[in-house]
Amino acid sequence: MLIIDRRLGQAIVIDGRIEVRVTEIAGNRVKLGIVAPRECGVVRKEVEQAAEHNRAAVLGDPGRAAAALRALGRKGR
């Protein structure tokens, strides 16, 4: 993992085609703007994890479904 400091308005470029720019800083929140080609999927990590947990629940794996609920901060049965 690469960890770098960026200030408001500064950006990083990934693979020469994805730009991540700091657009706003307010308290402990940071807003990022992302410019990427359409073929690059950009999703928030928690949305990606929720989709995986939903797939596990649908496939009937109770152990994975309970772990998914715990990861999301809910009680599993």
Image (tube, grey):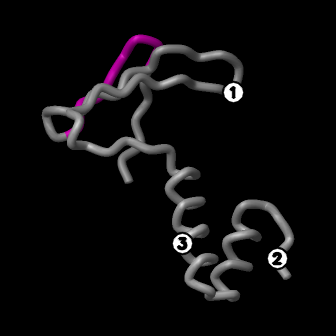
Please, what secondary structure does the residue beneath circle 3 have? helix
| Label located before the other in sequence (3 or 1) | 1
Labelled disc at residue 46: none
Give the Cα separation between the discs numbered 3 and 2: 16 Å
Up/down of 66 relative to 40, above or below = below
Q: Nearer the viewer, mark 3 or mark 2?
A: 3
Does residue 44 belong to the magenta stretch?
Answer: no
Location of residue 33 by image quarter: top left
Task: Name the residue at the top extreme.
Answer: 9
Task: Give how far across and how far down residue 10 sits, in percent.
Answer: 36, 16
* Pointer 1 residue: 28
| Residue that badge 2 annotates | 76
Which residue in the protein does label 3 denote? Answer: 55
Region in magenta: 7-14
Image point (82%, 64%), residue name: 74
For this view, does 8 lie left or right of residue 14? Answer: right
Viewer-side residue, 33 vs 26: 33
- Quadrant of the frame with the C terminus: bottom right
Residue type, mark 1 in image? Asn
* Residue at 62%, 86% in the rendered image: 60
Residue 10 among those drawn in magenta: yes
What's the CA distance linking mark 1 and mark 2?
Answer: 30 Å
Q: Quadrant for the N terminus, please.
A: bottom left
**Helix, strand or loop status at disc 1:** loop
Type of amino acid at the residue the image marks with label 2 = Gly
Residue in the picture at 52% in, 67% down: 52
Badge 3 crowding class, 10 Å Cα cut-off, few under 14, some 14 to 19, many 20 or more, is some
| Closest to the observer, 45 or 12 | 45
Please report whichever mark, 3 or 2, sits nearer to the chain's N-terminal start: 3
What is the quadrant of residue 55 in the picture? bottom right
